[in-house]
Amino acid sequence: MKPWGRVCLAVCLCLALGLSLVPGRAGAAFSDVKTGQWYYDAVTRMESEGTLAGYPDGTFRPNAAISRAEFVTITARLAGLSPSTGQTAHWAAGSLQAALEAGWYDWDEIPPTGETFDQPIPRQLAVKILMKAILPDAAGDYNTQSAKMRDFSALDGRYYNAVLAAYAAGIVTGDNNGNFRPLSGLSRAEACTLFLRAEDESARQPVRPADPAILPEVPEPVDPVRGGVSENGWLQVKGTQLCNQQGKPVVLRGMSSHGMQWYGQYANAQSIRNTAAFGANVFRVAMYTGEGGYLSQPDAIKRQVIAAVDAAIQADLYVILDWHILSDGNPRSHTAQAVAFFTELSKRYAHSPAVLYEICNEPNGNVTWSGDVKPYAETVVKAIRANSPQSVILIGSPTWSQDVHQAAADPVAGTNLMYTLHFYAGTHGQWLRDRITDAQAKGLPVFVSEWGASRADGGGGVFPAETKAWLDYLNSRDISWCNWSLCDKNETSAALKPGTPATRSWTAEDLSESGRIVFAAFGQ
């Protein structure tokens, strides 16, 4: 799961706008960003988070124009939209193609053939794209909002709805003279301000409630767990299918913990037994490497992780040891630490058929499969295989483990290897299911080690119809999965209602709307 929010947005802005990143740097000032300037708050807010470092000469260059390609790419990252197959070799062609397919703009506004990709984006088009991607349900009264624009007559009619909604939501306020300037370009400073305003407004939107009539009945907990380790033994990968020790297809369905440093109580023995009692046969231990996790406090976090793994084994569950990279988006950044960790843990669990190893949760940012993820995977797989020659190893891919098509074209050599895919039903749709189908057709074994019934940011309500489409697809192809996440966090992807104790048995009444959908699906 992604605590993407402002930090991820700032990173995306830096990458797309050509700015440099200095992790952990904070408190510096840009020579061309001064107190009292209209963009000061937006820029300094990003800088204060330690993710925006500007150019080597200490400037931010707020007045430089942002291109169509840059604006769409940032919007796509913010909305969790993965690139499609572009029609040109341009660096942003995939994101532009995906945005076009998502209906954020029309063919004539930014032709996918690429001739306008690097041209400045008009304000009216930028606002349309941003509103469709981030605030698609927003609206604005014509009479009230049009009166705020002195130059409303210059606005093309096809942009009325989006621009009026943006004014009503406070995303756009016009210049000091009350003009929107719909045909003018958009500066980097204006882009920063628009993105942050849209993100903040999206976070304030009311959660979409699920219709109680379509929430499934959750079976009462049972004991003992069915389909666990004692029944299936050592797992193996045959073709694209996960199989048990006898070579028969097996499907794992269960939960992922949230970050151990935040919600480690829900990875205790009681919580794991509770999950098993509802029918799960796998538990994923999400060990964040950054965000105050393992790299900051290795001994304490490792103790938590080992306790969770041992508890899952005791409950007869399969258990995934997840090296949960996120803000440290390139797995090669900490290869040595990963090798040391997996060497130690694979030696500890060398003779346990219960343990699977997920070696890079969600590679992201300026990361490639062939240049970064695959070489890292080859190194870590070798370290694990030195102690555990037959355990199943799960490998992520770029773009938050959605680029399985890249892995399918150039897989890691070895046996009992699978490739993870992550989705969130409120953000990712048929195009990503098609990507799985194509990857499997090329022989790639896929394991959905993280998914949510919410949007990719963990909020927005649950999406029952979209979740059902995903679960029906996974079931039809016998694809194993873990849901995000077993905690009581105040977000709609959490499986438990706020305040649910981790120290007692649970009933269906303890489950959130997401939890009801997921726990009912364990036994499908």
Image (cartoon, helix red, strand yellow):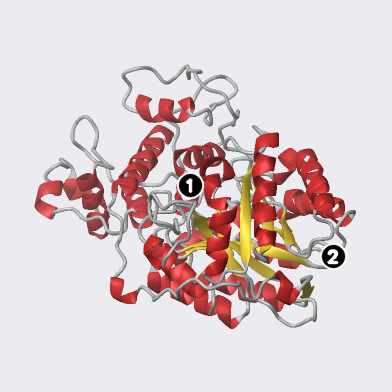
Identify which residue is drawn at 31% across, 67% down: 210
Q: In this view, does 428 lie above or below 18?
A: below
Which of label 2 and label 1 is nearer to you? 2
Give the quarter of the image for residue 254.
bottom right
342 left or right, relative to 138: right
Give the quarter of the image for residue 297.
top right
Residue 256: % across, % down: 57, 57
Type of amino acid under label 2 = Gln
Q: Residue 390 carries which label?
A: 2
264 left or right, relative to 393: left
Q: Which of 282 and 476 is in front in this view?
A: 282
Dot placed on the residue nearer the N-terminal end, 2 or 1: 1
Residue 115: % across, % down: 51, 55
Q: Can residue 75 be seen in this view?
A: yes
Would you name the residue on which mark 1 appears? Answer: 74
Q: Nearer the viewer, residue 343 or 121?
A: 343
Does dot 1 land on a helix, a strand or a loop? helix
Q: Measure how far apart labels 2 and 1 are at the Cα level.
A: 41 Å
Q: Which of 104 and 253 is in front in this view?
A: 253
Type of amino acid under label 1 = Ile
115 left or right, relative to 129: right
Residue 86: % across, % down: 57, 62
